[in-house]
Amino acid sequence: MGSNGTSWADQWDNGPDPVTVSNESKKKNNALGKTKAVASTGVKKLKEGTSVGFQWIKTKYHKTTQKH
């Protein structure tokens, strides 16, 4: 058998080229990574804001209960 023609896979495989699939996967993973980073930053800001808000409430409550 010679190897001067197309292979069986070249003749019968009509799926996408693996190189194309991997490039599309990289784009999706990159977008997913960016989305995760943005979400993580948002959660951190929310957590910090909530902490500051609770501290403010605690300080205000403490001031009103300290009056004699």
Image (cartoon, grey):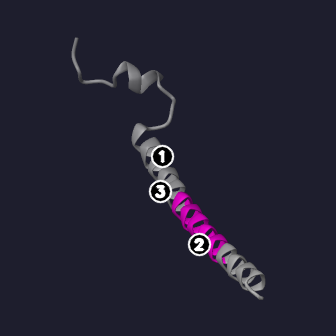
User: Image check: 31 left or right of 50?
Assistant: left
**Quick one: quadrant of the C terminus?**
bottom right
| Residue shown at the point (21%, 16%) measured from the top left | 2
**Extreme residue toward the front, this view:** 68
Q: Earlier in the sequence, mark 1 or mark 2?
A: 1
**Direction bottom: furthest residue:** 68
Q: Nearer the viewer, residue 60 or 8?
A: 60
- Residue 13 percent location from the top left of the image: 47, 25
Q: Decide which of 54, 41 is in the foreground and name it.
A: 54
Disc 2 element? helix
Q: What is the quadrant of residue 52 in the picture?
A: bottom right
Mark in the foreground, 1 or 3: 3
Secondary structure under tag 1 reads helix
Q: Residue furthest left?
A: 2
Label 3 belongs to which residue?
30
Alpha-carbon span between mark 1 and mark 2? 34 Å
Q: Which residue is mark 2?
A: 48
Task: Choose the circle earlier in sequence order: 3 or 2.
Answer: 3
Number of numbered callouts drawn: 3
Residue 61, by quadrant, is bottom right
What's the amino acid at mark 3? Asn
Q: Residue at (56%, 60%) from the top-left corner?
A: 35
The Cα atoms of the two marked residues, 1 and 3, are separated by 8 Å
Is residue 62 depicted above or below 10 in this figure? below
Q: Position of residue 3 (x, y in %)?
A: 23, 21
* Residue bounds of the magenta highlight: 35-52
For the point 48% across and 46% down, the residue is 25
Amino acid type at image mark 2: Glu
Please identify the dominant SS of the magenta region.
helix
Which circle marks residue 25 in the picture?
A: 1
| Type of the residue with mark 1 | Ser
How many neighbours does mark 3 have within 10 angstroms: few (below 14), some (14-19), or many (20 or more)? few
